[in-house]
Image (spheres, helix red, strand yellow):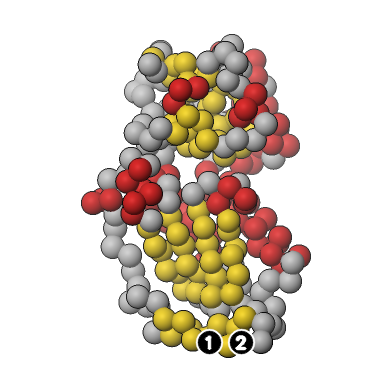
Amino acid sequence: MVMLGVGVLQLPSRLRHSLFFSSSQFASSRPQGVAKVVLKKGKTQLFKDGSPMVYSGAVDRIIGKPPPQTGDVVIVADGTENPIGWGLYNSVSMFCVRLMQLQHESTRDPSCALNIEKLLQTRIAEAVQLRKSLGLPSAKTNAYRLVNSEGDRLSGLIVDVFGDIAVVASSAAWLEKYRNEVESCLRSIDGINHINWRPSLDVLKEDGFDISSLKQTQTSNLPQRSMVRSWKTEFRTQFR
């Protein structure tokens, strides 16, 4: 059973990144409105080693009042309340936190600490650069996977590019909360002129998301057809 603890302390938002440097600082204080998810003893190493999905059985208690809601940023800490990273909370799913950044990463790049918008910008930019290093897109192909969920450290997000259209498969509740931020990052990429957002309804249900709250996907501005090159083959794709 997850237990709820005491409330949080007041702290200006401009200081939030600086506090992530020190475990001892976070053990005694937290930024305003950011809860701390404390793991059970013996459950920490799995997540330090890179597993991004914190399952509810690994959680001992949650410190924060009011308790975090789905999509909220939370600090993840070991049994002694020393932080190991931060992530996005889910109040319904069996995976209650998706770890987005470990503490040593936040120390190296404090601009992303507890800042999902900046993290999205950074991770998507890294994904673009990785594909460019692999020659994607190229004169031979303009169809490729730009973001591959956990493979690009953005759990639940898949982005496939077909010509100048980015097709987004959303399979996590946090993505629906931060949809505007994701779309803003994609629009900033050279060559992408249209975005087709496609929620994975069955997976979102499993993630505890109320699909009745989904905003209507805008497809009216998509071209009826898009020319796609895949090595020696050219074909037209149609999006509905």
Q: Quadrant of the N terminus?
A: top left
Residue 146 shows in the view: yes
* Residue at the extreme right: 133
Residue type at tag 2: Thr
Residue carrying label 1: 235
Residue type at tag 1: Phe
Report the front residue among 236 and 220.
Answer: 236
Q: Give coordinates of residue 158: x percent, y percent.
A: 52, 58
Question: What residue is at 61 percent from the left and 41 percent from the top?
Answer: 112
Report the front residue among 113 and 201.
Answer: 201
Looking at the rendered structure, the secondary structure element under dot 1 is strand
Question: What residue is at 28 percent from the left and 50 percent from the top?
Answer: 211
Above or below 225: residue 34 = above
Q: Which mark is residue 233?
A: 2
Q: Give coordinates of residue 101: x percent, y percent.
A: 61, 37
Above or below 183: residue 111 = above
Graded by Cα atoms within 10 Å as few (under 14), some (14 to 19) or many (20 or more), the crowding at tag 1 reads: few
Residue 240 located left or right of residue 63: left
Query: Rounded to the nearest whole Å, what is the CA distance between mark 1 and mark 2?
Result: 7 Å
Report the front residue among 135 and 232.
Answer: 232
